[in-house]
Amino acid sequence: MRTNRIRTIAVAATALAAALSLTACGGEDKAMGTKPAGAADTATPTATGTDDKAQSDAPKAGEPETQTVPAEGKHAGGNGNGKKPETAPNEEAAPSIPACTPKNSTVKVSSVSRPINHLLLTVTNTGSTDCAAYYAPFLRFDDAQAVYPVLDDSKPQAVVTLSPGQEAYAGISLLGEPGQNEPVKSDNLGVIMVDKNNESKGESTLKLPAETYTDSLGFVTYWQSDVENALMF
């Protein structure tokens, strides 16, 4: 009986020692980072930040979805400065109005009572379409080599356009202050019409009113839309 009890205690001690040995091994495995046999693999996420950013950018439940607004001036079709793209310089410009010339208009010169020492030049559109009285007429008294001076201060805000039958006017100042220059008598007046490039488009020769005198201080105005503007200088 005593022998059996000693054998039972020995067996129990051996089992306890075995259990303690296993527990110690398991703890060592855990400390060393080794996986116990039969343990399932667990995936470790890669620390790239990509998944976290994707999750932070994603709208949360119940929040409205937002869109990124491009910076000003960078919208599709723009040129980077927020302005509408300019017209290409090689695009064909709108056709201009033909100039009034001796072929589609007539010119006449007449005396006026006021102001003194002035004449009035009138151009009439005799054609079937509009024409424009560009700039000022070039004038030549008799056989003068130089054209008469043009008064720059008389330039209108816009080119005078004439429908068929309409008229435009230019004032001619004949003399400067009395005694400044010797007047010269003239009999004929050459009137040269010009185009939008200020180039000659033909000359008309008119008979001047009797006893017309000019000097080097006279001038002619730009074409005007009414008589008053033509004679106000």
Image (tube, helix red, strand yellow):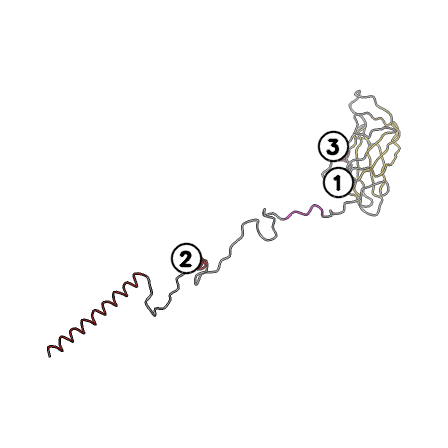
Residue 46 within the magenta-colored segment of the rendering:
no
Quarter placement of the N terminus: bottom left
Residue 87 within the magenta-colored segment of the rendering:
yes
Q: Amino acid at mark 3?
A: Asp
Mark 3 vs 2, N-terminal side: 2
- Report the magenta stretch's main SS: loop
Image-quadrant location for residue 34: bottom left
Residue under circle 2?
Answer: 47
Q: Amino acid at mark 2?
A: Ala
Q: Which mark is residue 152?
A: 3
Residue under circle 1?
Answer: 159
Crowding at label 3, few (<14), some or many (≥20) Cα neighbours within 10 Å? few
- SS at mark 2 in the image: loop
Q: Does residue 187 appear to the left or right of 150 in the view shown? A: right
Spatial CA span between label 3 and label 2: 80 Å
Residue 121 in percent (x, y) is at 82, 35
- SS at mark 1 in the image: loop
Write down the region rendered in magenta. Answer: 85-90
Residue 4 in percent (x, y) is at 13, 78
Crowding at label 2, few (<14), some or many (≥20) Cα neighbours within 10 Å? few
The mark closer to the camera, 1 or 2, is: 2
